[in-house]
Amino acid sequence: MTVRHNVPILAAAAVAAFLASCGGEGPVAQISDTRTVESLPKAAAPDATSAQRFGFEQATARPSPAQGAPGAETVELPFTWTAPEGWQQAPERPMRVVTFTTGPNHEAECYIAILGSSGGSVAANINRWRTQMGQEPLTGQKVAALPVIDVLGQPSPWVELRGTFTNQAGEPAEDTLMLGLVCPVETFNIFVKMTGPADLTGAQRDKFLAFCKSLTWSRSANQ
Amino acid sequence: MEPIGESMKAVLRTLYHSLSSYGLSCVLFLLLFVLTLLGTLEQINLGIFDVQKKYFASFFLIHELFGVIPIPLPGAYLVMALLAVNLTLGGIVRARKRPAQWGILIGHAGILLLLAGAAVQYNYSVSGNLTLYEGEQSNEFESYYEWELAVADASGRGPYTEYLIPGSRFMDIGSGGTRTFNHAALPFDIVLEGVYRNCIPRPAGQAGQAAGRRVDGFTLVGMTLEKQAERNAAGAYVRIQPKNGEAIEAILWGYSPFPLTVELDGKLWTFDLRKKRFQMPFTVALDTFTHEMHPGTQMPKKFESGVRKIENGIEQAVTISMNAPLRHRGYTLYQASWGPPDAKPGQRLFSVFAVVNSPADQWPLYATIVITAGLAVHFVRKLVVYLREQSKGGA
C-alpha cells in the first residue's frame, strides 16, 4: 500500500481530530450534576468576611469541621511578633506559622516555621539553606562562628546568602538573597527565612533582623 | 457509470488496506516518538500535568517550535487510537494464522489489551488524596488537579443537595470571559466573570500593578502556573443573580477556609470553589498511624496506618503501608505521606492516602502476561524448529 493511499486517511483523521478539539460551552449552561451528602465539607460561615475567607484576618468564630470530614488541628502559638512597616501578611500556607511579602510586586517573602527535632539540627538546616543557594556546607566550627542575635532569649545564628536559589521544585532563581535565622528552643527550632531579589531583600536586612528580635513569648507561654 | 455499490466497496477496500498497512504503523510510531520527545522537552516550561494534557491526552495540538513557529500535530490520544485500529486490522485480522504466527498474534493481542487499558484508565479513572487525622473517618477523597464549584442550601441539618459545576465547564472561561450557570431548583443564576487557574486574592491597595477588578476591597492577582499543578489555586469573580432581587458580587478562591455564604429568601446558600471531591462506596476510619525514620535522618523507614474499612455497618481492620495498599471495589488506597512534620510527642498525626479508582487497574499486568506468553510461544517454537533442523542435519 503506497504513501498516497495513507495520506488521505491521515489527513481526514487530522481534520476530524481538529474539529473534535474545538468547541466548548456557550455563554449560558445548565447545571447537571448534583449529589446528596450527610454533611458539607465546609460548614456555612455567614459572618466570615472576605478578609477572613482569604486568610488576612483570623475568624472570631471558626466553623467546626463537618462530620465525617477531616478536621484542622490548631496549635496555639506561644509567641507574638511585630511586622515591619511595608510588609503585608500573605494568606496561610501549609507548614508555616505566618508569611509576609514585600516589594512592588511582592517579590520578597519572609516566613516563620517551627520544626521539631525531626527537622534536623541548627547546622543541618543552615547547610540545607547553603545548598539551596549553591554554596558548600559549613563545618560545625564555622556554624558555631556565625553571627548571632538574641531571639526569644536564645542566641540565634543567622546567615546572609547570595546566589542562585533553587527551590524544592528544582526551579532556579538567579541573583537571590536569602536571610535565614534559626532559633533553638528546647526540642524545637524556630526558623525565620526571607528570600527575594538580591537588591530588594538586601534593603530589608535591618527590618528582617528587627522582625526576628520582635518575637516575644506570650503570656500563656510563660504560665 | 460504475454502480454505487462497487464504488463503495472500492473505497472500503482502500480504507481497509490503508488502516491495516505496515506503512501506517511506521508513521504512527514515528509520531509517537516525536510527541514523546517534544512533550519531554516541553516540561522545561510546563509541569507534567499540563504536558500530559497537551501532548498525550489530546486529539490535536499546536507545538511552537523554538517558541515561535506553530506546528500542528496529532495528539497521542488520536495516534494511539489509530494504532489500535492498525494493530487490530493489520496485526490480527489481516495477519496469517499459521502456527508459526501464533506467538505474534498473542503478543499483538497483549499490546491491544495494553492500549485498551490505557483508554479505559484515561476515560474512566479518578485519583486524588484523602487526609485523615487519627480518630477521623471519611468516605470522600479530593482530586489533585481538578476543581469544582459546589453550591448548596446549607439551611437545616442535612442531608444536603450539592449542585456541582465541574472545573472542566468553567476553567476555560479565562480572566476576561463570562458564563452563566443555572438550575431549575436554584432561585438564582451563577455568573462567573473571570476565572484564573492560579491566583491569589490581595487587598486592592496592595495589588500594585496587578490591580484588577475590585470586589469587597479585594482583587484577584493572576500568577504563573505552578509546574506542580496541584499547587495551583483557582479563583473566580462571581455574580449571584437572584431571580428577584439585586445581584451579589464576590470573589471565590480555592484555598479559602470558608465557603462564600449568602442569605437569600431566608435560606443560607454556600458557594465553595474546591478541589473536586469523589465519594467512595465505603468509609475509611484512621485508628492509628505509626512511623519510623532511619536513625539520624529524615528518611522514612516505615510508616503505616491502621484503618477500619466500614461498609454497610460491617467493619474490617486493615493495615495500609508503603508497599501494601488497600484494594476494595475498584479503589486502591496507597500510603502516600503523613504529618505534621513538626509533631510533638503525643500530638495527633494525620495520614495521607493516595486514592485511585480505575476499572483498568490490573490491565497492564494482564497485558504484560499475555505479551510474555506470546513471546514465549514464538521463541520456544523457533527454538524447537531450530533444534529439529540441527538434529536432521546432524543425522
Image: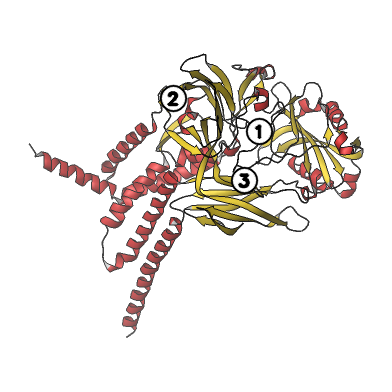
The answer to whether dots 3 and 2 both sit on one chain is yes
Q: Earlier in the sequence, mark 3 or mark 2?
A: 3
Q: Amino acid at mark 3?
A: Thr
Mark 3, secondary structure of its residue? strand
Q: Give the Cα distance between marks 3 and 1.
A: 19 Å
Figure label count: 3
Letter of the chain that mark 2 sits on in the rendering: B
Give the residue number, with chain letter if any, for mark 3: B131
Choose top left, top right, bottom left or bottom right for residue B100: bottom left
Q: Is residue A50 left or right of residue A89?
A: left
* Residue A116, above or below B367: above
Mark number displayed over residue A101: none
Depth check, mark 2 against mark 1: the one in front is: 1
Question: Along the line of sight, which residue is nearer the eye, B222 or B107?
Answer: B222
Q: Amino acid at mark 1?
A: Pro
* Residue B251, above or below B330: above
Residue lying at 86% horizontally and 36% vertically, measured from the top left: A220
Mark number displayed over residue A63: 1
Q: Is residue A217 visible?
A: no
Q: Quadrant of the N terminus of chain B?
A: top left
User: Percent position (x, y) of residue B170?
Assistant: 48, 28
Q: Give the Cα distance between marks 2 and 1.
A: 28 Å
10 Å neighbourhood of mark 1: few (<14), some, or many (≥20)? some
Residue lying at 57% horizontally and 49% vertically, measured from the top left: B354
10 Å neighbourhood of mark 3: few (<14), some, or many (≥20)? many
Mark number displayed over residue B182: 2
Choose top left, top right, bottom left or bottom right for residue A30: top left
Letter of the chain that mark 1 sits on in the rendering: A
Q: Is residue A60 left or right of residue B132?
A: right
User: Percent position (x, y) of residue B306?
Assistant: 63, 57
